[in-house]
Structures are given as structure tokens and as C-alpha cells.
């Protein structure tokens, strides 16, 4: 486990997945605030925070933030598609431009 915690890519995807889990909890709570939704939110944000604390010891905030946002965006868009909340053509092009901007800034 210590080996994985020293790998930034593992921590980036862990934080992104944790944020995606929190987002799923927030989506659940948008209908009815339930204990399971609150647990998902709390677990997601806790894991994301811990992963980012470890990451900040290894790289700068700007690089980490861009990488996490990119991974999280792709995960949340995938989750939305799985929930049947597909994007309109306009929204899809907007998402592509956002991701392209993130990649450009991250270079």
C-alpha cells in the first residue's frame, strides 16, 4: 500500500474517483436526502482530501488540480451517461472545449 501512496497517478485517480463518488451522493440527495447519500458524500470527500494531502507533498497544486479535474470530469460524464443523463450536442461540444482547455493549461 505504501508503494501505491507514493505514485501520483494512483493518488490522482483515487481523488478523482472519490470526488465522483461524492458527486453520485450529491445526485442521490438531490431527490431525497437519505443516509446512504450522506455517507457517499462524506466518504468521497474524506478520501479525496486524504489523497490530495499526500499528493501535495509530491507535486504542486496547479499540476495536481488540473489532473484531478480532468480525471473527475471524465468519470462524472461517464456516470451521467450511465444514469441516462446524456449530453446534448451543445453540451458535448462544451465539455470537449473544457477538457481541451484543461489539457492546454496542464502542459
Image: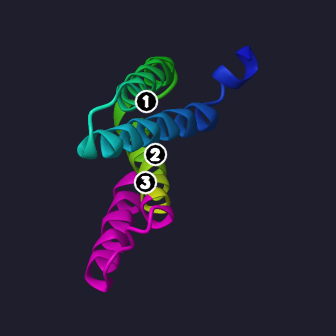
Would you say 100 lies left or right of 58 here?
left
Residue found 33% across the figure and 69% down from its top = 95
- What range of the chain is rendered magenta? 80-107
Question: Can you tell which mark lies on residue 22?
Answer: none
The reply to whether the magenta stretch includes residue 16 is no
Give above or below for 12 relative to 52.
below
Give above or below for 49 relative to 63.
above
Q: Secondary structure at mark 3?
A: helix
What kind of secondary structure does the magenta stretch mostly adopt? helix
Of pointers 3 and 1, the one earlier in the residue sequence: 1
Residue that carries the numbered disc 2 in the rendered image: 67
Question: Can you tell which mark lies on residue 40?
Answer: 1
Residue found 57% across the figure and 31% down from its top = 11
**Quadrant placement of the N terminus:** top right
Measured as percent of width and height from the top left, residue 30 is found at: 24, 44
Measured as percent of width and height from the top left, residue 26 is found at: 31, 40
Q: Do the residues bearing badges 3 and 1 touch, measured as CB atoms within 8 Å?
A: no
Measured as percent of width and height from the top left, residue 47 is found at: 48, 23
Q: Do the residues bearing badges 1 and 2 touch, measured as CB atoms within 8 Å?
A: no
- Along the line of sight, the residue nearer the viewer: 94 or 22: 22
Q: Nearer the viewer, mark 2 or mark 3?
A: 3
Q: Place residue 20 in its image quadrant.
A: top left
Question: Can you tell which mark lies on residue 76?
Answer: 3
Would you say 9 lies left or right of 21 here?
right
Q: Label 3, label 1: how many angstroms apart (C-alpha)? A: 15 Å
Neighbour class for label 1 at 10 Å: few (<14), some, many (≥20)?
A: many
Of pointers 1 and 2, the one earlier in the residue sequence: 1
Q: Label 1, label 2: how many angstroms apart (C-alpha)? A: 22 Å
Of pointers 2 and 3, the one earlier in the residue sequence: 2
Amino acid at each position: 500500500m505504501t508503494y501505491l501512496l507514493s505514485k501520483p497517478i494512483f493518488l490522482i485517480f483515487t481523488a478523482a474517483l472519490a470526488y465522483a463518488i461524492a458527486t453520485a451522493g450529491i445526485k442521490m440527495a438531490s431527490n431525497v436526502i437519505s443516509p446512504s447519500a450522506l455517507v457517499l458524500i462524506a466518504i468521497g470527500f474524506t478520501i479525496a482530501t486524504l489523497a490530495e494531502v499526500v499528493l501535495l507533498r509530491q507535486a504542486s497544486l496547479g499540476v495536481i488540480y488540473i489532473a484531478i479535474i480532468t480525471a473527475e470530469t471524465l468519470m462524472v460524464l461517464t456516470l451521467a451517461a450511465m444514469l441516462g443523463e446524456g449530453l446534448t450536442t451543445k453540451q458535448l461540444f462544451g465539455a470537449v472545449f473544457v477538457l481541451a482547455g484543461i489539457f492546454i493549461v496542464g502542459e
